[in-house]
Amino acid sequence: MKKIIIGFMLVICSVYAHANEYMLEADYRQRPPEMMINEKTGAFSGPLIDVLNLAAAEVGLTVNWQNHYFKRSYSRLIRGNVDIVPRVIQKEDRKSFVKYFDPIGYQQKNIVFIVRKGKESLIEKYEDLYKITVGVKKGTVYFEKFDTDKKIQKKLSVDDKNMSMMFAANRFDAMIILDISSFEKALNALGFKEYSYANYKHVQVIANQYGMSKKSSKIMLFDKLNNAFNSLVKQGKIRQIYQKYQLPPLLTEEEITGMDRNVNNSILAD
């Protein structure tokens, strides 16, 4: 009987290991409109979910998605506990453990500053930031000048909800925003309506990319997956997926020619 049980367990382990060979581990998070979680049902959806599922299928893989805050996903990328994460900050010091796929497209993403209603003129130009306190989200890359500027009084928060609560409680004068819809949702959930946007904004075009852990057990499939992403772009399937969610299509390399880019330091991400 003991031999039978051991044999049965070995079979199960073998089946699990075989199945794992064809499965990618990926993390998602609440980041509307490209990754959305129904807070009541826990169901998740969005174009970045669909794109990776489709790219994985192109090379014979399925995706096992897990919900984690970006800070947790970042830690999992370092250790190799997750294979791929959408919208990862691209920084030089992270290239030692994250390998970046080619962009699936580009987006004009203005960096804006939320202030209280009637205070839009508080920030008319970049230098006005030296006169106020600014809420920032820990781990987020905005744009190089701001990120490296030690003269700005920055107040850290852990996520959108936390930063919105701090702003509503007058913990700082303004907060810097990359994803407008996400913060509007967080502020509205608090019932806080007394906000507006400063007159100053930073305009840039940024790349939309996925990052893969260099410690991933699937790292040998990187090139195949990268080719799959590029194939989806060329076939127009990325555009179709964004249209499915009634979102503007991503810009192409040709469409952003001549535009001000901040691809290396402000990848679409947390």
Image (spheres, rainbow, N blue to C red):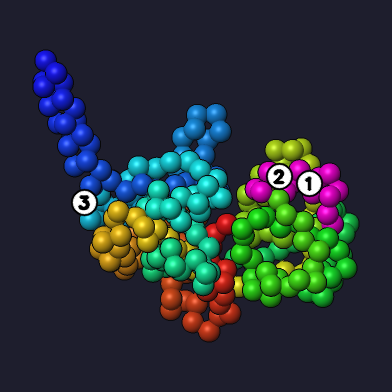
The residue at 55%/80% (across/down) is 259
Query: Looking at the picture, how far across and down is residue 219, in whole percent?
Result: 30, 60
Mark identifier at residue 122: none
Query: Looking at the picture, how far across and down is residue 235, in whole percent?
Result: 29, 65
Front-lying residue, 190 or 157: 157
Left or right placement of residue 135 versus residue 71 in this view: right
Q: Quadrant of residue 209?
A: bottom left
Q: Quadrant of the N terminus?
A: top left
Left or right placement of residue 222 versus residue 168 in this view: left
Q: Quadrant of residue 253?
A: bottom left
Magenta part of the chain: 158-173
The residue at 53%/47% (across/down) is 72
Pointer 3 residue: 60
Magenta includes 159? yes
Q: Are marks 1 and 2 in contact (CB under 8 Å)?
A: yes
Left or right placement of residue 183 versus residue 17 in this view: right
Mark identifier at residue 166: 1
The residue carrying pointer 1 sits among few (fewer than 14), some (14 to 19) or many (20 or more) residues within 10 Å by Cα, namely some
Residue 223 visible in the picture: yes
